[in-house]
Image (spheres, rainbow, N blue to C red):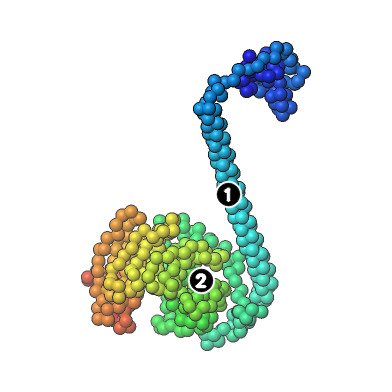
Amino acid sequence: MICAISGEVPDEPVVSKRSGLLFERRLIERYIEDHGKCPVTKEELSMDDIVLVKTNKVVRPRPLQAASIPGLLGIFQNEWDALMLSNFALEQQLHTARQELSHALYQHDAACRVIARLKKERDESRALLALAERQIPASMAGVAPAAVVSNGKRAMEDEIGPDGKKIRPGINPVMIDELTECNTMLSAQRKKRQTVRIWQGGEEGNYSCIHTLKDHTAEVEAVTVHATQKYFVTAAKDNTWCFYDISTGSCLSQVGEASGQEGYTSASFHPDGLILGTGTTEAVVKIWDVKTQSNVAKFEGHAGPVTAMSFSENGYFLATAALDGVKLWDLRKLRNFRTFSPYDSDTPTNSVEFDFSGTYLAVAGSDIRVYQVANVKTEWNLIKTLPDLSGTGKVTSAKFGTDAKYIAVGSMDRNLRIFGPPGDDQMDDDAKPSAE
């Protein structure tokens, strides 16, 4: 008779009325006390279902292994091995439990950090909203005197806040709606745009200064106009960029902290108008959400200040220029997918420009080079190289004309040159400016 639990001959055998299985009394009593079930059939079982089996007391023979010293050593070795295996399994379970606990604590800490950041952003947003609500009625009531301009200067002095900084009215919800509406329209029409723009100068072809803006404390390095033609942004080496209303010349928002260690060297609006790109003296390209004036992405990899940038009309590509050449960025995956190094290490790339159709890319440094725009995987071929006719070896800017019929080039000799197809009379009518 063998116990169904221990597999050995029991000292006090008992039998289950339900299953007929034989057990060691002390073992089955402890199991029923802990679980209340049969250890083999898993059926409900109580001590009332257990019947004691009356047997004669016999002396069990010693196992064969225990009859000699080598046998005893073998038994001890087997017991030791079993103990070590059990200890190893327990250590593995402990290690796994510690890893799970560490992961849970890390997730909890990360969640607490996210919650704290969201609360901080919420409180800042509430404070800005309260400030805007206080300023809007006052600004609406004082529109007439604030808009008075004399000799190109604003008559009303800027208000200074408690922290010593100028108080800006901010980009209000009406303006955000206008920017969003423009973005929606341009996004839908980008690939099938059929628009007509009419440009008109003064009656005698003269221009006069109507505003003088002095919100920056260092050199203004870039100006870019929004697609609505109602707003524009300036970027300066004081590490700030300003959002202006063209009609009034008022600074609606100044973003960034004044710093003497770094600053902005280039800026450009995305074709849809809700994204702004800026380049810095620290070789960093920053992407901004215009509605919230928050930095949403950064591109690093250039050497030297970012001298120029241009967004493609397809909305996906951004070209940036610096001392080490031109880098092309994929805005969908936020990565650099191609680099041009057209000049030597001592010649910076001063200008980069996509044409309006997004078909060509112009690069200017010691000469002007035109590339055929392809995609991320296909090579961008150099299709034309134009010489620098100024003799200075430094082209400062290059812009495409209407339908890419000509390229306007500025050089260090302070002359403007127009490059186009030979004998193209229509190009002459469109461009009009003289050769130099």
**Spot occupied by residue 138 in the image (x, y as percentages of width and height):** 68, 75
Q: Residue 386 carries which label?
A: none
Query: Is residue 242 or residue 320 the one in the foreground?
Result: 320
Q: What element carries label 2?
A: loop
The label on residue 230 is: 2
Up the image or down, 183 lies above or below 346; here it is above
Contact check, label 1 and label 2, Cβ < 8 Å: no
Query: What residue lies at 60% left-to-right and 17% top-to-bottom?
Result: 61
Residue 32 showing in the rendered view: no
On the picture, is 320 further left or further right than 103?
Answer: left
Question: In the picture, residue 173 is in which quadrant?
Answer: bottom right
For the residue marked with disc 2, what is the amino acid? Lys
> Mark 1 and mark 2: span between their CA atoms?
52 Å
Q: Mark 1 points at which residue?
A: 103
Q: Residues within 10 Å of mark 2 (few under 14, many from 20)?
A: few
Is the residue 129 above or below the residue 90 in the image? below
Dot placed on the residue nearer the N-terminal end, 1 or 2: 1
Which of the pair 93/130 is nearer the observer? 93
Q: Whole-percent x and y of residue 140?
A: 65, 74
| Horizontal relation, residue 135 to residue 432: left or right | right
**Between 281 and 353, the one nearer to me in the picture:** 281
Q: Which amino acid does label 1 sit on?
A: His
Tell me which residue sits at (26%, 76%) in the image.
388
Residue sitting at 29 percent across and 63 percent down?
371
Name the residue at 51% across, 71% down.
230
**Residue extending furthest toward the right:** 48
Picture quarter with the N terminus:
top right
